[in-house]
Image (tube, grey):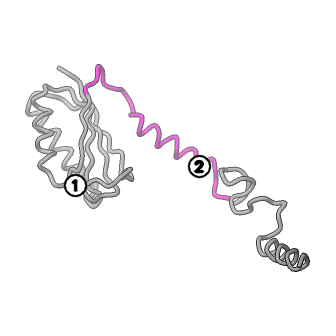
Amino acid sequence: MPNYEHVFLTRQDVTSQQVDALTAQFKSVIEAHGGTVSKTEYWGVKSLQYRIKKNRKAHFTLLNITAPSAALAEVERQQSISEDVIRFLTLSVDELEEGQSAMLRKSDRDDRRDDDRGFGFGGGGRGGPGRFGGDRDRPPRRDRFEGAAADEQGEE
């Protein structure tokens, strides 16, 4: 039987329990048609790149499926009817990934990076020498403007 990776997005205002119920429903449809779901991953609520059916965020869920194409066609038909599912994508793959998917590995890596970075306001990061300090050699902004105003008056 062919292998598939199937990702579906549900509306942001649906609870995680309702997402679990939808996942269980889709798994039962696949199993009723002679397929198996080897892995289910809930990726959480993520921001969308653009609006989909008036939603800016969505619950993401991955299913690794080994099933005949008829089972997948039935799941996709039910998802297209459901008001809670806003988008789905099915990819045919040669073999299914073991362990965590790339999305979960990425979120673990991001969590570790946030823990290492700390919450201080000083040094490092993207903002230069200090997050709010800016360039330490410059005087505060008010003094710079007053100095520039005095220079202009002196020239006249």
* Residue at screen point 30% across, 58% down: 55
Q: Which residues are magenta?
A: 92-120
> Is residue 58 toward the left or the right of residue 127 in the image?
left
Label 1 crowd (10 A; few <14 / some 14-19 / many >=20): few
Residue that lies at the very extreme toward the front in this rendered image: 156
- Of the two numbered discs 2 and 1 on the same chain, state the one appearing first in sequence: 1
Question: In the picture, which quadrant includes the N terminus?
Answer: top left
Question: In the picture, which quadrant includes the C terminus?
Answer: bottom right
> Is residue 155 toward the left or the right of residue 12 in the image?
right
Label 2 crowd (10 A; few <14 / some 14-19 / many >=20): few
Residue 102 vs 141, above or below: the answer is: above
Residue 85 vs 104, above or below: the answer is: below
Q: Pinpoint residue 70: horizontal percent, then vertical percent.
A: 9, 29
Q: Pinpoint residue 35: horizontal percent, then vertical percent.
A: 15, 28
Residue on which the image places disc 2: 115
Residue 155 vs 72, above or below: the answer is: below
